[in-house]
Structures are given as structure tokens and as C-alpha cells.
Image (cartoon, helix red, strand yellow):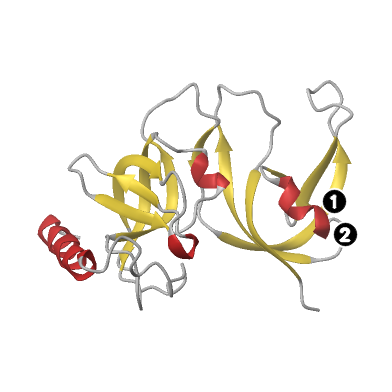
Amino acid sequence: MRMETLLLFVWMTACATSSAGPDVGVHNVSDTNEQPASSEAVEGVLRIDAKSRSKRFQGVWLEQSDGVRLLLSYRTAGCWEAFKDRAVQARGAFYEPEGQSIGAPHFRVDTLSLASEDPAALYVSLGREQDLEGQFSWSSGAAGSKQEGERLLTFKSDTSYALANPSKAERFSDGSAVMIKARTLTRSPYSAHTEGPLLWLMNIRKAQR
């Protein structure tokens, strides 16, 4: 998106919402209700609103160096919290939401990563959303590891995945087939961790047979 077009969009949406107050247009929009443009890269600091407003809106933003803020998500979640207040690079697409919406440029994130090395960070990148079929199962931590003897919940598809937020899956841990929507998280090399891929669970449902 050209800078002139982006600034015009910000001005038009600000004019459209300024007279109705800060909570106008925070409903009737979902992450799938969009018209994506071509993929491109953006950079800035990831910010999260301190508290939710009406209709449970709690924005996740990319604050760019020129002051323009891109809206990444209408809801906060743990996968965003891991990158809060850190400089990041994101790849994805600008889109125009249908219906009422927040008056700001909307950007759909495919992938996200730290813009520079940060030894204090737990994770260095967030992968694109993916749909997987498999099952959750319990296992024990490997001998000699910090998790030795612990009961761990994992997801098994073609690959076995550790879970960044296992509590979300506990009620599905009976071994039945499930469909999940998830993103991969890449752990920081500076933090102690087990080997293998790691998932952030977004949605879980029973698989239809």
C-alpha cells in the first residue's frame, strides 16, 4: 500500500468515526470477514490496549515509526502477549473489513518475528495459522530434562507438538480425533526449553467422522 493511500485511509476513517465517540464500530467484524490485498512486510512496536472497550474490543496494534498504528487484532491473546512492547516485523496483508469497524488501517498477520535479537524474550517468531487434524495425548517429561516426571499434554498429527497453552486442550484429552487451528511459536535460543515444534492453540473442535 502506498503511503499516500494509507494516510488517506486513516484520514477518511477518522472523520467517519470521530463524531460518534471512541466505541463506535467495534462490532460486526470478524477475522475472516475481509478482503486481503497482496502480501507485504511491515515493521513497528507491538502494542496491546490496557483494557477492553465495548463489545469486548481490546486492540492489538503495530505502532510504526511514523506514528501510524495498524490494527492487527480485535482481541488480545497469549500469542500476542509474548511480543508486547517489542519491535517486530510482520508479513501479511492490508484489508478492508466489511460492516462496522474500528477506524484504523487493518493488517492481517501471516507471520511475525522479533525485529532484533532480544535475550529476554521467550519466543522469536510466530507462524501462520494452520488447520491440523490429530489427537491430544498425555506423556511424561523426558528423563534428565527439567520436565522429568511431569505429565505433559501434547498434540499428535503427522508430527508431535508441544503446547504453549495446554490448559485450552484439557477437556479434549480423551484421545478422540480433533481439528485444531493453531500457530507455531519459535522458542528463543536464550531460554531453556525442550526440543521439537511448539503450538499456540487458537480453536479446537471434535473431528467429524
Q: Residue at x 37, y 39 (%)?
A: 88
Q: Which residue is mark 1?
A: 137
Residue 35 horizontal/vertical position (percent): 35, 74
Q: Residue at x 50, y 23 (%)?
A: 120
Tell me, for residue 7, which label it has, or none.
none
Extreme-left residue of the structure: 4
Tag 2: amino acid: Gly
Res 171 quadrant in image: bottom right
Kindly check if marks 2 and 1 are in contact, taking CB atoms under 8 A apart as contact: yes
The Cα atoms of the two marked residues, 2 and 1, are separated by: 6 Å
Q: Residues within 10 Å of mark 1 (few under 14, many from 20)?
A: some
Q: Which residue is mark 2?
A: 175
Where is the N terminus found, in terms of image quarters? bottom left
Q: Residue at x 84, y 30 (%)?
A: 142
Q: Residues within 10 Å of mark 2 (few under 14, many from 20)?
A: few
Q: From the viewer's perspective, is residue 106 above or below residue 187?
A: below
